[in-house]
Image (tube, grey):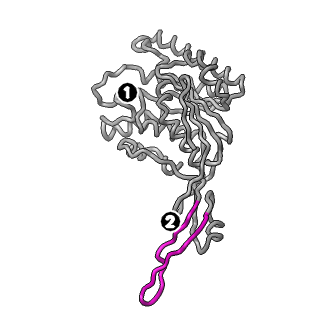
Amino acid sequence: MLSMTEGRNVIYIKCFFWLFNAMIFLSQKSVVAFQSFPDNSKVCFLGDSITRNGEFHHSIFQYYLLRYPTRNISFCNCGIAGDVLNGMLSRMDDDVFIHNPTHAIIMFGMNDLGGEYQNNSNGFIRDLNSYTSSMIKIIKLLKERNIQIILQTPSIYDDTVKLKSTIVIGRNQALFNVSHIVNDIGKEYQIPVVDYWTIMQNTNLKIQSMNPKDTIIGFDRVHPGPAGHLIMTYSFLHTMEKPSLLSHMVLSENVSISQFFSSKCHIHSLKRNYYSTDSHIDNHSIEAVITSYALPMVLSTEETVRKVLKFIPFIKDFN
């Protein structure tokens, strides 16, 4: 059962995972599993409008829903459009600690630099110092409550796509600098960091080498589109997870033998359907009722997503 309720500045998503029944006629690949969010984890995503949109962490949520169906994991969307780190500091009690989270995942930067960084190096430096001090204050508040932290670098600002929309010179470079700050803070406080900026920038330039009008970001050059969110999902899972075991089904002579050679699934029944010819009997089909405990993710069919999948091994690593 998947439930969603609206709260103050927060969308609270909770899932009690279910098992999936399927009529299966094929075998799925398998790899080794690694657990980052254990059972009874409550995960808060802190951020601005990109977090508030939530597509990337909805996909991360889907990963845990399909890959670890017996775990009870809750995701809380604590993102607010236009927010900055200082704004997050002012609402920690009402929007984060109220949920008693076990994990906090933080991404800020797109709004934190304001407008001063453009053609104004002094203002840019002042903004970076403020960013660093505010991030450290949030980290210390979380550590005082023994909440596990994951830092995320900001996503990119697309200043290379050939669109009519205005380009803010220097904004993406500023976000690159912020990503270095986030990585440095992660090293200092021994906190894992998911680097979105680097993989998004590199992949975006690759697809634009084929078509300069393509972008993983929206037409406003700020908010990731479906392809951008897919890259963010991949980057998060690639950083926090090892490729995980999918249901592996081997259909043999009977249920017992089939179950012995299968994994991450329960085979309830197996039936062979036969048809006759004039001289002999041939197998026609095998019909099985199976409960799968680890299914592949459902991905968008949007055109740019298909292009991005040529450059990131999402299918190979996680599907």
Q: Is residue 51 left or right of residue 136?
A: left
**In the rendered structure, which disc, 1 or 2, sits on the residue that comes first in sequence?**
2
The amino acid type found where label 2 is placed reads Phe
Residue 56's place in the image compared with 288, above or below, is above
Start and end of the magenta stretch?
Answer: 267-290
The alpha-carbon separation of the residues under discs 1 and 2 comes to 44 Å
SS at badge 2: loop
Query: Observer-nearest residue: 278 or 105?
Result: 278
Task: Give the percent coordinates (x, y) of residue 122.
Answer: 47, 9
Task: Give the percent coordinates (x, y) of residue 212.
Answer: 30, 35
Q: Is residue 174 magenta?
A: no
The amino acid type found where label 1 is placed reads Arg
Residue lying farthest to the bottom in this orientation = 279
Residue 190 visible to the viewer: no
Query: Observer-nearest residue: 90 or 314?
Result: 90
Which residue corresponds to the image point at 54% horizontal and 40% vertical from the top-left? 60
Query: Observer-nearest residue: 127 or 206?
Result: 127
The tag on residue 135 is none
Task: Give the percent coordinates (x, y) of residue 55.
Answer: 47, 35
- The quadrant where residue 162 appears: top left
* Residue highlighted by disc 2: 25
Which residue corresponds to the image point at 47% horizontal and 87% vertical from the top-left? 280
Q: Local crowd at mark 2 within 10 Å, few (<14), some, or many (≥20)?
A: few
SS at badge 1: loop
The tag on residue 221 is 1
Q: Is residue 50 left or right of residue 13?
A: left
Residue 153's place in the image compared with 240, above or below, is above
Give the main secondary structure, helix, strand or loop, of the magenta stretch.
strand
Task: Give the percent coordinates (x, y) of residue 208.
Answer: 34, 37
Quadrant in the picture for the N terminus:
top right
- The quadrant where residue 304 appears: top left
Which residue corresponds to the image point at 65% horizontal and 42% vertical from the top-left? 72
